[in-house]
Amino acid sequence: MSPLAAGEGARTVLVVDDEPTARTALAARLKRLGYRVIEAGDGKAGLESLRRERPDLTILDWMMPEMDGPSFCEQVRQDPELLSSQILMMTSHDQPQQIAEGLARGADDFLSKAASKYEITARVQAGMRTATLIRRLEDVTEEIRRKQEVLERELQSAARYVESLLPPPGIPFRGVQMVHAYRPSLGLGGDLFNIVPWSEDVLTLYLLDASGHGVSSALRSASFSTFLRRDNLLHHVGSSDPGAILMEANRQFPLTEDGNYFTIVFAKLDVRARTLSYATAGHNGALLHRRSGEVRWLARPNFPLGFDPSTIYPTEELPVGPGDRLYVLSDGLYEVPTSNGELWGQDRLEQTVRAFGHRSLSEVVSGTIEEAVRWQGHDHFPDDVALMGVELAEKVFS
Amino acid sequence: MSDRLNHEPVFRLDEALARVDDDRETFRMMIELFMEHGPKDLADVQSALDAGNAANVARSSHRLKGALLQFCAPAALQACKELEESAKAGNLAQGGQLYAMLEQEFQRLLAALRHARDKGMAA
């Protein structure tokens, strides 16, 4: 048995030629080289054999009745199941413009009908090498696709878990309406967000972003979210003051040895006093859209947590009124690029929120995410995306 | 032209056998196939010529040429090529003459192949 016919089985060549003498001669040569050979007498039968047998290489005559070689190639290249087939076009047309036409219509290489047996052997072997590489590439691509499906299922499960920790959308706290959306990235990012009722009148909410991606970022975020539990904050900070909380966090979560850190926006809404206080650490992710139409970003340039233990994170306080909306969001929402790399950006996000201002809170949240998806042109965000919207109701207390 | 062609062998057995790695069984099968299909292809050329259909003359003679190439038959191949080229150019003015040449060389080749087959293809 020839080495090629051993092991995984002989590789297969399909010979499509309407002229039986030449086809027989070529088939015999290929069999002697150790290949399994399938013969077809015209283009239509050849296509059927290609679909049924999936040969490694197809050697195709140019001129045939009914379906000629170039038309055969075009059909193959338009068929998703067959398009990676390797096709060696056999022809007595060896003028450059005809070769160019054959290549343009889908042939991979050419073989002159008058070629010597050495040339036939060399071209077939070259075609087989390419076919083998393409098969490997297809196998690896399929493996990656399967793994990605598993990863996507796990990420969706992680997203459901993060969302399960949140109060249900609607009115989790009297006097406040809340809507949120969460789209984890394929790279498993470290964004976490939550709304934590602090007292009868006070609600706190935060969005936390651990630098980097992957399991370690997600675990560091989970550890930080434990720190941000109400009972823990009461014990270690003694108040719900955003600046005080971030300064304690800055002490407890220094830069890791490999340079990882957190950014955070932490806000506190007092529905009785109608005040919004907040502090940020390296995070630009809070936007206040007042009913009057005024839009302002709640951020000041400062260090992320863990850079410098002496950093002061001041608490800013603003009055708020009925109908005012606070959005807390991941930077991943506005840092989405188009295919040419242009980012959506904070300005476009702000314009979108402003343009959607007359819509319901849930429509603004879903519509803004749809706009970001439209900008990047596909559904998968490169980084985690969370968007939380909170609206102060008309009547805070009944 | 015919003088030159007539001095060449009808077909070169050594070369034709070398093309199939001296596989005489395959070569015998090729001769049988040619004896069966070749005359039909030649008849197709003649029908197309009678109908004045240059495209079909080109197509049929092209098909016949594919077989002639396998047998290293220079005179038949040359006659076939000339007819195909003129038909491709849409010119059938010399068609009858070229066909007559092709038919003559074709019959000589058939006879030579039959002879080779019957003699066990001793080169």
Image: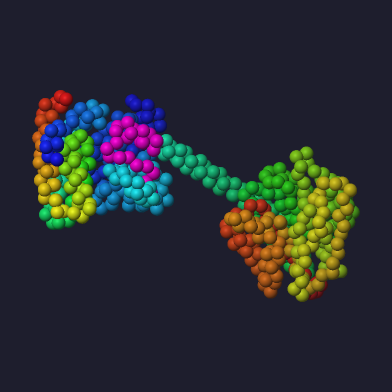
Q: Look at the image and tell me whether residue B65 can be seen.
A: yes
Q: Residue at x 87, y 46 (%)?
A: A309
Image coordinates of residue B15 in percent, x first then y, are 22, 29
Of A2 and B45, the residue lying toward us: B45
Q: Residue at x 16, y 25 (%)?
A: B123
Stretch in magenta: A106-127
In the displayed structure, A329 sits above or below A290; it is above
Q: Residue at x 34, y 42 (%)?
A: A110
In the displayed structure, A136 sits above or below A315; it is above
Residue A325, located in which quarter of the rendered image?
A: bottom right
Examine the structure image and report whether residue A108 is included in the region drawn in magenta: yes
If the image is split into quadrants, where does the N terminus of chain A sit?
Answer: top left
In the displayed structure, A33 sits above or below A256; it is above
Image coordinates of residue B99 in percent, x first then y, are 12, 47
Of B81 and A286, the residue lying toward us: B81
Image coordinates of residue B102 in percent, x first then y, are 13, 43
Q: Residue at x 59, y 62 (%)?
A: A374
Of A274 and A368, the residue lying toward us: A368
What's the coloring here? Answer: rainbow
* Left or right: A31 in relation to B112: right
If the image is split into quadrants, where does the C terminus of chain A sit?
Answer: bottom right
